[in-house]
Amino acid sequence: MMNNPNHVSFVLDGKTVNLNFADSKYKPTTTLLQYLRDLPGHKSVKEGCAEGDCGACTVVMGELKNDKIQYRAYDSCLIFLPAVHGKQIITAENLGNSENLHPVQQAMHDYDGSQCGFCTPGFVMSIFALYKQEEKPDKEEITNALSGNLCRCTGYRPIIEAAESSIKNRHEDHFCKCEDIIASLLKKINTKDTIEIITEKQKYFIPFTKKEALSLRKQFPNALLIAGSTDIALRVTKRHEFLPEIIDLSHIRELDCFNINKDKAFIGSNYSLEDLRNSSKSVFPALNNILNIFGSRQIRNRACLGGNIGSASPIGDSIPVLMAYDAEVVLESVETKRTIKLREFITGYRQTQCKPSEIITEIIVPIPKSDILIKSYKVSKRKDLDISTVSACFSLKLNENKVEDIAIFYGGMSAFTKRAVKTEEILKGKTWNRKNIEIAMKYITEDYKPISDARAGFKVREIMAANLLMKFWVETNQVYKH
Amino acid sequence: MTNINHESGKFHVTGEAIYIDDMQMPDRLLHGFVYVSPHAHAKIKSFDLEAAKSVKGVHAVLSFKDIPGHNQMGPVIQDEPVLAENEVQCVGQAMFLIAAENQEVADEAKKNIKVEYELLEPNLSIQDAIAKNSLLQPERKIENGDINKGFKQSAHIISGEFESGGQEHWYLETQICLAVPGEGKELKAYSSTQHPSETQAIIAEVLGIGKNDVEVECRRMGGAFGGKETQANHLAAWASLLATKTGRPVKLRLSRDEDQKITGKRHPYLYKYKVGFDAEGKILAADIQHYANGGYATDLTMAILERGMLHAENSYFIPNIRIVAKPMKTNLPSNVAFRGFGAPQGIFCIENIIDIIARCLNKDSAEIQYRNFYGIKENNTAPYGAKVENNRLYVLFEKLMKSSSYKSRRKEVNIFNKKNEFSKKGLAMTPVKFGISFTTAFLNQAGALVNIYSDGTILVNHGGTEMGQGLYTKIRKIAAAEFGVDIKSIKVNATNTSKVPNTSATAASSGTDLNGMAVKNAIEKLKARLIEFAAEQLSNIYGKIVKKNTIVFENDYVFDKKNPELKISFEELISKAYINQISLSATGFYRTPDIYFDRAAGKGNPFHYYAFGMAVSEVLVDILTGGVQVLRSDILHDVGESIIPNIDIGQIEGAFVQGMGWVTAEEMKYDKNGNLLNHSPDTYKIPSIQDIPQDFRVELLKGYPNPNTIRKSKAVGEPPFVLGLSVWFAIKDAIAAIKENKIEPNLKLPATNENILLAVSELSV
């Protein structure tokens, strides 16, 4: 059975909204931000940058997970409207009004969390998502979750205090009371049958199964694949591009998974980077380290691993790390299924071996043996919510303090993530000491010819890359001393 | 003094606060768009707008030829056209305006605009401009003593040059104006402006109509920081032109990228200096040159330059000094006001000179700073001839050095640095002495209109604007205190040129000083009328004689101080006053007394008073990655008697973090054609929540009321911005530790990880 053609359904203001794109001023590439600002009652959602870098447009979406509603914060500027199908949208107006504030709003008010007030509803929503999450966050977790919201007035201290205080004193709010009603509304929304939105100029598909997705991929090989759309949305919001055909994979639950055995982790391509951050903590510390400072909470809630790999950006932060772990990529089409090493998957600037009929369905990451040390690094102008100037990941196996095997990957140093082959050669078989590291540092420029851009000059990229090798040595030294 | 939350706080947190883009838009609204120059410098040989005009959904495409009044929006000097005529002078300069039904239509229209250019050589840096002697206006000079004599007396003389970078305001709400045509030539503009009166004036001049036909209103801005002092005028002029031409309301809002590309920034500076000092580091002579990168038009550059010069000595008495400042003209967007208004640049220069002296003498900077502080009774004349009175430097120094444990932490930092090769700590103190008043003396005036309604509620109008700084909250508090009523009875109205005319910008940290006094003046007039009436009423009600001079207003009552039981509620008094035909509305006015400045002579008394502050910051620098963590910052700041302490602390913390941004990660990069490379927040990085000091201690100096100001308070908006410099000096201190503090590091401002690594690699060679 098909879903009602051209319709998507979601819950807003406690009611189910059925939006018909065939008969509406909204396009399938209208962003959630644009839609909400067009409504009379949701002006709290502000446009600060339209690229997911300021968080002024943060909303919370409620989604059914095991019959409970899971609340997460998102940048509404990066979400195409059809993608909210089956979800509950919550803005600051839904939390409370000036006569009756939600505890999060009350704390932001009482602690002077607002000055000009323009970023404030976005902060309120990010804190609200924390307020509703099961585990109580500590201070580090709070600031991590708020690093996607910029404030230019306060200097943040009162906002941190407001978040800490409201979360510390949290109690049942009106969302708890209405959760059953909202859950029943969400359950009624059809999330089984592919949604086809076909307007005069655009096609937008939302398949709910891998099988449907692959068949759409075969039928529309030129369609753009999106999941989190945290990258693709910028083509609409910043470059005002027209995107004629889109297949939105974000509703395929079977690709949103993380399974692990004693040798390997099998990560669905739709698995969000925030979920991966949490799942990778003990088993893949180098990956977890990078994900802690990858984008922001709002972006990680939406962006998925398949997307970060598939876009094959030279500054995609997960790529050097997953290459160091020697991850594999599973590609499927209607007829075929194949597995390629990530180290070979990326072939050029934003180019991969993925064929027009294929979709990345899974990423397989081997669990490193205990004698292999993997460490990741990211250098950026600002620690959080910044794109790498240079990133690196090293995988090292020592044998009696001699380098038995080493793999070195840098991001931001060339048109795509590449291995530092010559530097590795110099180190192989050598003693793992400072003298040899200093020799190897000079070989980085043999492996890479970085460029100058808005982030940094080429010269300093070379210094950073060489220094990261030294930093790795210093840290391994500390590890082995213990 | 008790804490009071921001008067709009409840509206901020719920989204009920209405910014211009949130207003209920009028019918037949059109969207305005600006077509800007793609070239830094070019002659416009010809242009053709016909194809653009014929795009469906386009309602107007305007060039300079369509301007009915003056094609000028320079606030002081008339060198900034509303729309380019024969020449474009920077990338992002406005050339044409489009009114369209939506963005898509406007994009299509832009593609159809045809322009033929003849490219000219641009000046893109201060050095380019110096080489070509390209100045916006003549240089300025302030001189005191005899520098040649001073240099002769000096045991040491150092000279050199260094620079500081620009800064993008990054207010969260981008520039916006909604222009609504009325009857005849009338126009009402809802503008996100710090200066409604000037916005009104520019609209009137551009449209060629009287100011009485133009009404400008601003309820609140989503941040401004100086960026909406003159630049809001541009949006307002553009939107008003389109509204007038189409006869329809026009909203013009810049996207973030447009805003960053089109609008001006903090002035980048080049400094050249020669300084002479004795063996103890006492400065005997300083010859300082400021070169400000003004961009292509003057805007407020001369006033910014002047404030830079008036802060060139910061907190220090320099007996022989010459300050020469040059406003360089370059082919970049005209640089504009930004919190501190040149003072941070002037102060950075002298603080860096002090730091260089300290390293030269192998002493701690704090020691050199202290040695050169202005004296209390002597050595207290500034280079421009004014006395530095009510000097708080010594009390701040003494208290802060103690509360921050400066000396013991200095030792700990040195020990840490000896033990660690790849991570270094740095510690630094920065003082600020900040002159309060517009240096253009006539601007130091303000007006107010206070209405009491017959139900006893009060509406306060004043000329100041709310950009988040809490001005409305302070005004509310001031009015409540003067009337002796609960703060809930007072509402502060949206700032509107039809309520209070001929106002000055809300700038120079002066919002509360000036408008608070004007409001007080209006209330005094109202109270004089009410006191007379109350005395009469109380005498009648209680049958006892109540004298005027014993009437007080307190706790929502008006009563006889001598017999407090002889009282009437404020509400009842007002109700009776109305019936008895007493006027319940009054205007107020204030002008700051006794300030003047002779620009030609470089002498005068430009400031009503000084605000003082001091900060100590400690950082940890990763020498391998250039990563910086601010471990701790202690700030002690002088706001006189705080009107609302939590609001003042909010200003201090916010200014400090913004200042920290200027000196660390905020950096403007241009390509060789004058295109700004980092025109969006993915590459332009303001501080985020994890960048602030891990341990952040902010205190107000207590027990030092300020004479002759509203409620004995001091201005607070800008001075603490300067304290962010302490982070830069701490980073430099950490880098210098690589060579045991013996070699002066060549660290640029901002200290990005790139600039840190370059400074480190230069030291290591």
Image (tube, coloured by chain):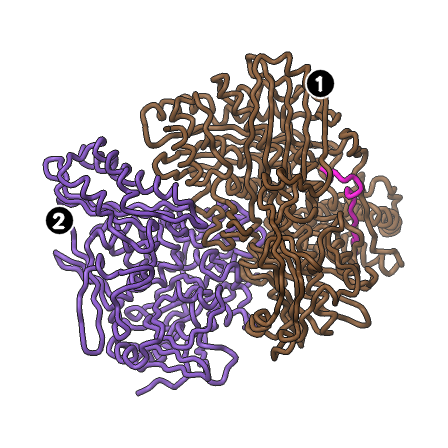
Chain colours: A purple, B brown
Mark 1 residue crowding within 10 angstroms, few (<14) / some (14–19) / many (20+)? some
Residue hosting label 2 = A369
Point out the image quarter for the C terminus of chain B: top left
Q: Name the mark on residue B124.
A: none
Image: B12 above or below B292: below
Out of B383 and B615, give the one closest to the viewer. Answer: B383
**Amino acid type for the residue under numbered disc 1:** Asp
Q: Is residue A335 above or below residue A110?
A: below
Q: Nearer the viewer, residue B475 or A438?
A: A438
Please check the rendered image and state whether residue B438 is part of the magenta-colored stretch, yes or no.
Answer: yes
Which residue is farthest left? A400
Which residue is painted at 43% across and 74% down in the image? A243
Identify which residue, B29 or B470, lies in the foreground. Answer: B29
Q: Residue at x 46, y 56 (%)?
A: A53
Categorize mark 2 by other alpha carbons within 10 Å: few (<14), some (14-19), many (20+): few
Amino acid beneath label 2:
Lys
Q: Which residues are magenta?
A: B437-452
Residue B723 spot, x, y in % from top left: 55, 35
- Chain on which label 2 sits: A
Q: Position of residue A324 (x, y in %)?
A: 22, 51
Q: Residue at x 19, y 63 (%)?
A: A340
